[in-house]
Amino acid sequence: MDFVQVSEEEGDEPIELPAEEDGTLLLSTLQAQFPGSCGLKYRNLDTKAVRGVRSNEGRLFPPSVESGWGEYAYFCVFPKENKRKSDDNLENSTAKTKRIETRLRCTDLIVLGLPWKTTEESLREYFETYGEVLMAQIKKDTKSGQSKGFGFVRFGSYDAQMRVLTNRHLIDGRWCEVKVPNSKGMGHQVPCKVFVGRCTEDINSDDLREYFSKFGEVTDVFIPRPFRAFSFVTFLDPDVAQSLCGEDHIIKGVSVHVSNAAPKAEQNRNQQVQSYNYNSANSFGMHSYHPQGNHMNPGRNGHHRGRQFSILDGSERGPQQCQQLWWTEGAE
């Protein structure tokens, strides 16, 4: 049996790992000794340059067919967020926990779509399930005293505010929308949702939640059905979501890519374009098919309320196209 000398970083004391009969090294063997690693590299003795080891379907291949792994000293490759340093004392080394303290302060939130029967007392009672409520107010007509169907609420903690903004709310039997008023100058609030591309079918919502929870609290995971090779993950803290964008992550041996989820304003514009094209087509006697989603309450296991989607296969498209083809909203 052949052995490959591997160290965590160049210059560290190596560990000899057993190669397979065909001369390859299993990625699972590497990760058993170096959790979170996703590949190997070595320094070429002639050029002094660092070279990467070829990897395919969970196997690492030796640099040379004739001489195999040779006498090179190999060291590990880690995704940027998972790169382990010698002074880390984390128990779980598959990823670094990113806890980013936000400097954002609580602001008044507007609650839209309130039933006429909702009172300020019932409004306060509902939102107190999320945290301390400093203010709950329903806007009323000055003459009749009738509710105008919207109100405002303010929380004592930023965490409670973010929980409210990342959930949908059924108040007195009606779905209501809660958001930061545009008048506050925060119409372009940092999104909490990220797009995860290059997913495989064996990666389920529990796998995504477990992995990304190491960076910050995950409030929702959504995997489209039928499978489209991508998913959405929503974080409590938008700074955590943005810190992960543009990076690759290894989940169950698969390299996935995280990017920004398409803004809802952009999705609305896309939907308007689709609606325009649909109406134009009908005016010429043509028909198009746009299946509508149901109105179920979204859950924690990846079942979301769909609005409008395309039946085209999103696995053959880029991240932005996939996001435009599947519009989702709400999170538990």
Image: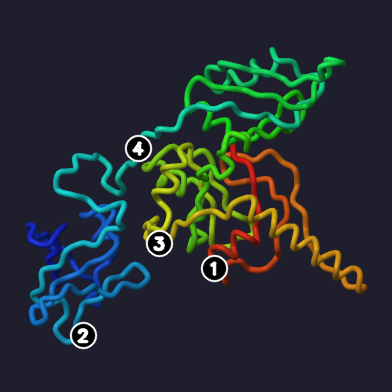
Mark closest to the chain's N terminus, 1 or 2: 2
Front of the two marks 3 and 4: 4
Quadrant location of residue 247? bottom left
Residue tagged by mark 2?
A: 65
Q: Residues within 10 Å of mark 4 (few under 14, many from 20)?
A: few
Q: Secondary structure at mark 3?
A: strand
What is the three-letter code of the residue carrying label 3? Val
Residue tagged by mark 1?
A: 318
Front of the two marks 1 and 2: 1
Relative vertical location of residue 3 with respect to residue 249 in this rendering, above or below: below
What is the three-letter code of the residue carrying label 4? Arg
Give the number of marks. Answer: 4
Mark closest to the chain's N terminus, 3 or 2: 2
Q: Report whether residue 53 is seen.
A: yes
Return the mark for residue 99.
4
Q: How far separated are the C-alphas under marks 3 and 1?
A: 18 Å
Please report the residue visible at 19 percent of the width from the left and 83 percent of the height from the top: 64
Residue tagged by mark 3?
A: 254
Relative vertical location of residue 249 with respect to residue 165 in this rendering, above or below: below
Q: Residues within 10 Å of mark 2 (few under 14, many from 20)?
A: few
Q: Secondary structure at mark 1?
A: loop
Mark closest to the chain's N terminus, 4 or 2: 2
Q: How far separated are the C-alphas under marks 3 and 2?
A: 26 Å
Are the residues tagged 3 and 4 within 8 Å (C-beta)?
no
Q: Is residue 270 left or right of residue 108?
A: right
